[in-house]
Amino acid sequence: MLEKLPSRKMILQHFDKRDSVMAGVILRVGAFKLSRNRNYFLVLCKAIIAQQISTKAAESITHRFENLFAGVRATAERVQDLPGKQLREVGLSNQKVRYMKDLSEKFLDGTIRPHRMAYLENEEIIRQLTGVYGIGRWTAEMFLIFSLNRLNVLPVGDLGLRAGLKQLYNMRALPTPERMRALAKKWHPFETVGTWYTWRILDEGIVVY
């Protein structure tokens, strides 16, 4: 289900009892703010575009990609109808064109059913999304956080989260996934909240996706 974001009071009460270090971060940083992007297909297109290139290059290609649709939304149908040549002309590699075509095909054939996602468990959504060429677990987890606002997501492969935890808890080295999961047991069921605040200690800007 689409979840309502918890209030700062509720978050503080939870972390005061479970993790005083994180509670201190919450007091310092302020309110928990999580944007939600409901255009699921475009979010995943942008994720494919952004792979292994700089943020600036990704923004430029995304802008050109969106301009292909002449003022209307990028949809699975419209991407499927576009010749690969046009997608390559905006800066997508052959491989990313293949990924995007596969994504649109899976939206169209019902492998990915966006209107059902609110009712699916996290792991089922991850399973569906990682069945698309070019979408891995990290991208699926970011989708859970920023498109569905799931509150219990711990992206153990996220370098920013690992670096933030190392700094926050004075660790000698970047934590292993096992150590991250053990630490986040104290956060449950608000793993996403702990992740968001950990990101904020590295970058004060509001995290969006």
Image (spheres, rainbow, N blue to C red):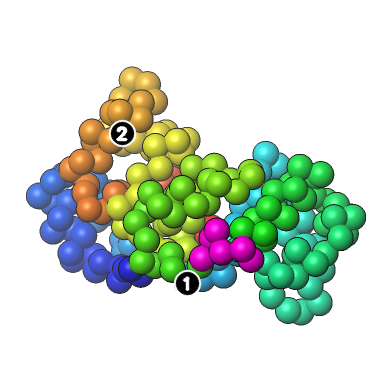
The residue at the point 80 percent across, 67 percent down is 81
State the mark number for residue 67: none
Q: Given the image, on which type of amino acid does mark 2 rest?
A: Met
Which mark sits nearer the N-terminus, 1 or 2? 1
Specify the segment rendered in magenta. 108-113
Q: Report if residue 208 is visible in the image.
A: yes
Q: Is residue 78 positioned above or below 86 on the image?
A: below
Q: Is residue 80 above or below residue 186?
A: below
Q: Is the residue marked by circle 1 packed among few (<14), some (14-19), or many (20+) residues within 10 Å?
A: few
| Numbered disc in front, either 1 or 2 | 1
Q: Secondary structure at mark 2?
A: helix
Q: Is residue 80 magenta?
A: no
Nearer to us in this view, 15 or 77: 77
Q: Circle 1 sits on which residue?
A: 115
Element class at badge 1: helix
Q: Residue at x 37, y 61 (%)?
A: 120
Q: Nearer the viewer, residue 27 or 78?
A: 78
Crowding at label 2, few (<14), some or many (≥20) Cα neighbours within 10 Å? some
Are the two marked residues, 1 and 2, in contact with CB atoms closer than 8 angstroms? no
